[in-house]
Image (tube, grey):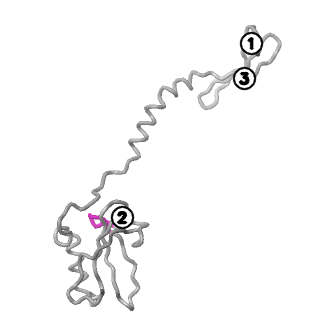
Amino acid sequence: MVRARRCSLYTSGAFEWSNLKFSRCWCSDSYLGFVVSLEPIKTMTRILPFLLVAFLFSCQEPESPKNCAVANPVEDLPWLKESIKTSAATNLAEYFYLVQGTYKGATVFTFLNCCPFCRFFPQILDCEGNVITNASITDVTNQKVIWRPAESVCT
């Protein structure tokens, strides 16, 4: 059992660093070391729960639609309808088709092709037609073809 020495403390040479107050403490003729004022720490422990809650709620991404909430995306999404129209008007229309799938729980679309002489990098698009970066077609699950031209050569 350690007994605490009873003596009067003398402080000298107080300084602050990063909002903490340090003081050198002496007891009679023995140097005891530094004592840190706990007042800033007490204040921080009172504020910390509020900061933590604020941080947790501020880090949420804005809610985006997980599915497009349409029965027929080919007809009901104007940007997709226009993209299909543009794709169907190209010289290589018979090689392109549209796939709908799921990426991280959200409905996505991508135009794919079976063109034997084309170099093509598919883009994954969300329900609003925005390109999803850093996504690969291999990351898309539940893929199903939802459009292909009448003269399609893809199987």
Q: Is residue 53 left or right of residue 36?
A: left
Q: Which mark is residue 34?
A: 3
Q: CA distance from mark 2 to mark 1?
A: 64 Å
Picture coordinates of residue 139, whole percent (x, y)? 41, 68
Q: Amino acid at mark 2?
A: Tyr
Q: Are marks 1 and 3 in contact (CB under 8 Å)?
A: no
Tag 1: residue type? Answer: Ala
**Residue wearing tag 1:** 4
Residue 35 as seen in the image, left or right of residue 105: right
Image quadrant where residue 119 sits: bottom left
Position of residue 2 relative to residue 59, above or below, is above
**Tag 2 residue:** 103
Q: Quadrant of the N terminus?
A: top right
For the residues labelled 2 and 3, the Cα–Cα distance comes to 57 Å
Let me know if residue 129 is in the magenta part: yes
Q: Earlier in the sequence, mark 1 or mark 3?
A: 1
Residue 77 pos. (x, y %): 20, 68
Residue type pointed to by label 3: Phe
Q: Residue at x 35, y 70 (%)?
A: 124
Magenta region: which residues?
Answer: 125-130
Q: Give coordinates of residue 72: x percent, y percent.
A: 18, 69
Quadrant of the image occupied by residue 151: bottom left
> Between residues 53 and 82, which one lies in front from this camera angle?
53
Q: Compared with residue 85, is residue 102 higher up or lower down, i.e. above or below?
A: above
Q: Quadrant of the C terminus?
A: bottom left
Q: Residues within 10 Å of mark 2 (few under 14, many from 20)?
A: many
**Discs 1/3, front:** 1
Rendering quarter of residue 56: top left
Residue at left 82%, top 15%?
30
